[in-house]
Image: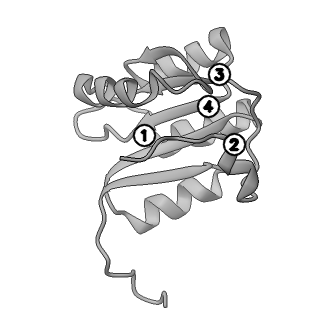
Amino acid sequence: MGTLDIHSFKESGIELHAELPISTLLVSSNTLVLRGITGMLKNVSDVNLLDNAPSRIDMMLMIDDLNPSLVIINDDEAGSDPPSILETVRLARHEYPNLNILMLINNQDFDKELSALRFGIRGILSQNFNKKKPDGLH
């Protein structure tokens, strides 16, 4: 298993709006997801885990209090209350334009991914990747 090397982002030309260590807020109502991400990141020297937000509303309140440079938000759409993840991302990017957001999604959803990227999300990770490309892409 590889390790996360924050310095490789700069070498690859990806611009992060963050100072090291990267102050990170995790957002998910799924305890297993939170434990998994926390377990992966807790020993990364360039990442400072600030807190876990159990909902998207809590996320917005915690961003204001904690001032993270990165938010990792899990797509907990099933059974979650409004606002939707896309509306939350749009609002967060509008209110905090230098905030980096990484979205975790359960299943590939081209329209959702494209919308999130248009709103300024920095990255999307899919748990279930289907090699089939959407119609019209080559």
Q: CA distance from mark 3 to mark 2?
A: 18 Å
Q: Which mark is residue 26?
A: none
Residue under numbered circle 4: 70
Quarter of the image where one finds residue 131: bottom left
Q: Is residue 43 left or right of residue 92?
A: left
Residue under numbered circle 1: 84
Q: Residues within 10 Å of mark 2 (few under 14, many from 20)?
A: few
Residue under numbered circle 2: 7
Residue 107 is situated, as x and y percent measured from the top left of the image, at 29, 57
Which one is closest to the eye, mark 3 or mark 1? 3
User: Residue at (48%, 60%) from the top-left corner?
Assistant: 113
Residue under numbered circle 3: 68
Q: CA distance from mark 1 to mark 4?
A: 19 Å
User: What amino acid is labelled 4 in the image?
Assistant: Leu
29 vs 20, nearest the viewer: 20
Q: Quick one: label 3 or label 1, which is nearer the N terminus? A: 3
Q: Is residue 39 left or right of residue 66?
A: left
User: What amino acid is labelled 3 in the image?
Assistant: Pro
Q: Is residue 55 left or right of residue 36?
A: right
Residue 11 is situated, as x and y percent measured from the top left of the image, at 74, 55
Which one is closest to the eye, mark 3 or mark 2? 2
Kindly indicate whether the residue at mark 4 contacts the one at mark 1 (C-beta within 8 angstroms): no
Kindly indicate whether the residue at mark 3 contacts the one at mark 4 (C-beta within 8 angstroms): yes
Kindly indicate whether the residue at mark 1 contacts the one at mark 3 (C-beta within 8 angstroms): no
91 vs 18, nearest the viewer: 18
Q: Residues within 10 Å of mark 4 (few under 14, many from 20)?
A: many
